[in-house]
Image (spheres, rainbow, N blue to C red):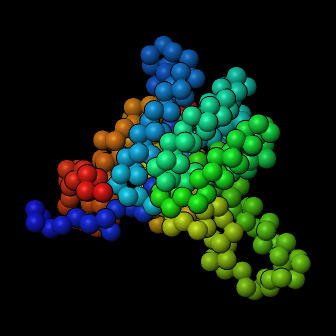
Amino acid sequence: MSNTQLSFEALPKHIAVIMDGNGRWAEAQGKPRVFGHKNGVAAVRKTISSAAKLGIEAVTLFAFSSENWRRPEEEVGVLMELFITVLSTEINKLHKNNLSLRVIGDKTRFSERLQKKIAQAEDKTAANTGMVVNIAANYGGQWDITQAMKKIASEVEEGKLEAAHVNDELIASHLSMSDIPDVDLLIRTGGECRISNFMLWQIAYAELYFTPIYWPEFNEDSLIEAVTWFVNRERRFGCTGNQIKALMENQ
Ligand code: IPE
Ligand code: IPE
Ligand code: MG
């Protein structure tokens, strides 16, 4: 294997991450759960920059699920504030690096202020040609399929579409991220082995990678480990973490 050249072709095009374990990470240190959320931001930054260095096309990060509204009001409040702050502080850096930011999910439930911040951030980076960073916020895989079905049903109702023409391609084209390749690698931190209503349709053929480490501890090495696992699993390439690192440096 030593003289076999590992190419970018072997890497996942779209990586999705369920960023879990913030609360347990904080509690393990006797701190409030929100301390974990605040420290999770550094892991978000590291993941985005490492994935960009690897030349990944798209990264989708699960930040807040449709079900997370059920958490204590105070925790939800902190998460929303954090979201607003991070959007403001990070957007210039993303823009400078030619990355485009998109928020997927039902945005209508967010405050006016947050919706405005999101729209500004999306507009500012819309024309960028580098990696796409999708933040899934108030997102649910079931919500995504439902909203696609509603659009299709209205097209049928309006006579623009025949029910007989509904097929999987058409459904896919109405889902979030229809212009981005399906997920190749799904990572979940925090040790749970479930999807928690994250993307459903788009992970049909994804490799699923579960790691026990808590999200605030996730870093460039953790991403390299996951990508190495993916390459070896998917392509049976027998590559090493160092080969992945070398690709990063050659970018
Ligand atoms: C993930 O961490 C972050 C969000 C869901 C916003 P958790 O808050 O779920 O942390 P654990 O799983 O309770 O440790
Ligand atoms: C999934 O984590 C959602 C996010 C990471 C945003 P949760 O902690 O909310 O999921 P469950 O409750 O373990 O299924
Ligand atoms: Mg959790």
Give the residue displayed 69% in from the left and 46% down from the top.
Answer: 120
Residue 154 location (% of width, % of height): 85, 72
Towards the viewer: 37 or 81: 81
Q: Nearer the viewer, residue 205 or 47?
A: 47
Residue 78 coordinates in the image, percent (x, y): 65, 26
State whether residue 194 appears in this view: no
Left or right, residue 10 beside residue 114: left
Farthest residue to the top: give it: 30
User: Is 2 or 238 nearer to us in this picture?
Assistant: 2
Q: Residue at x 57, y 42 (%)?
A: 91
Looking at the image, which residue sits at the far left? 2
Q: Residue at coordinates 30% horizontally, 41% vertically from top-left?
A: 221
The answer to whether 237 appears left or right of 134 in the picture is: left
Would residue 130 be found to the left or right of residue 141 on screen?
A: left
The x, y position of residue 70, in whole percent, is 71, 34
Residue 98 in percent (x, y) is at 49, 54
